[in-house]
Image (cartoon, rainbow, N blue to C red):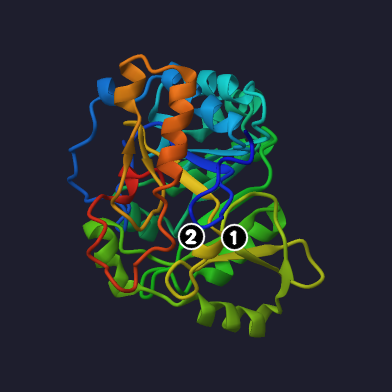
Amino acid sequence: MSQQLTDNFGRRIDYLRLSVTDRCDLRCQYCMPKDFKDFAEPGGWLSYEEITRVVMAFARLGLRHLRITGGEPLVRRDLPILVRELAAIPGIEDISLSSNCTRMEKLARPLAEAGVRRLNVSLDSLRPERYREITGGGKLDKVLRGIEAAREAGMAPIKINTVAMAGFNDDEFDELIDYCAPRGYTLRLIETMPVGETGRKALGSYLDLGKVRKRLARSRGLEPAAMPGAGPARYYRIPGSDTTIGFITPISQHFCETCNRVRLSCEGDIFTCLGDEHRYGLIQPLRDGCSDDELLEHVLAAVRTKPERHEFNENQEKVVRFMSMTGG
């Protein structure tokens, strides 16, 4: 059955971004309003048992790559227990984690021992005051300690995800490269996207990363490179070093034709495209007692709803949910 997880446009789906909570302990300007409190109730979240059933169904259909996200996934209690269960599923070759690392200092080793291999960290500034402003009160020193704890626990590669914003952090790209290089981290620059009201507001600071890449190519020299993982970044290496920089460009140079992923929200909704409001609900059939074969059919039906491409450029008002509700 491994050949069946293909959408209507012939794209093989082998990557699931799994949200375990919509809650977060930060309020990044482009993600969630500072006073937002309309979170899903924990009783409406998929249980760990339900999550494991869904991932097992995906794995039977050919899923290989799994990324755990939120909100901030580390706010969900006993996360290493879930990771251990997911790592034991036949067919799952790779479990990674996206985190802001505010809580990583204590959890890094239990998560690594449970099966997390790779880590993506949201880090938009290395200047404490600016970081506090962008995140709505975050403490940079705590985050940096968390990243270091993940490195010491053996997570690798560690990718630093920076949303590139004109007038906010576009003067820090060289600082971020110099932070990542000696530690073996990869810097990934990401364009802002019109996901929810906060995302649309952030478009006022939109930065075309094609221009940034050309500038860095002149100052640093860049050559094409590859990185492990199943995501959409285009990677370049600084010649004569192991320093790698990735560019994620959903606006200026979309990658829809090679999209291999879908998202599962903490409430059991499958989102097949970050730029589309359509969702396919799994929580009702799960709680109505569907069989494993029926669950497979639901997953296949959901994947068949995946659109050919997003409409971020043509229809910026299309997505009303916030990024934290989708699963990163």
Where, by quadrant of the figure, is residue 30 drawn?
bottom left
Specify the amino acid type for callout 2: Thr
Instruction: Using the image, determine if residue 16 lies above or below residue 203.
Output: above
**Residue at image point 23% right, 26% down:** 41
In front of the other: 180 or 62? 62
Q: Quadrant of the N terminus?
A: top right
Specify the amino acid type for callout 1: Leu
**Residue at image point 40% right, 57% down:** 307
Q: Is residue 201 left or right of residue 210?
A: left
In front of the other: 14 or 326? 14
Sequence-earlier tag: 1 or 2:
2
In front of the other: 44 or 135? 44
Q: Is residue 231 left or right of residue 316?
A: right
**Residue at image point 39% right, 48% down:** 305
Q: Is residue 42 left or right of residue 16?
A: left
The answer to whether mark 1 and mark 2 are in CB contact below 8 A is yes
Residue 251 pos. (x, y %): 42, 71
Farthest right residue in view? 240
Which label belongs to residue 326? none
Residue 258 pos. (x, y %): 57, 60
Residue 316 pos. (x, y %): 27, 68
Residue 61 pos. (x, y %): 58, 34
Viewer can see residue 69: no
- Please name the residue that numbered disc 1 is placed on: 187
Viewer can see residue 80: yes
Which label belongs to residue 162? 2
Within 10 angstroms of label 1, few (less than 14), some, or many (20 or more) residues? many
Q: Secondary structure at mark 2?
A: strand
Where, by quadrant of the figure, is residue 86 drawn?
top right
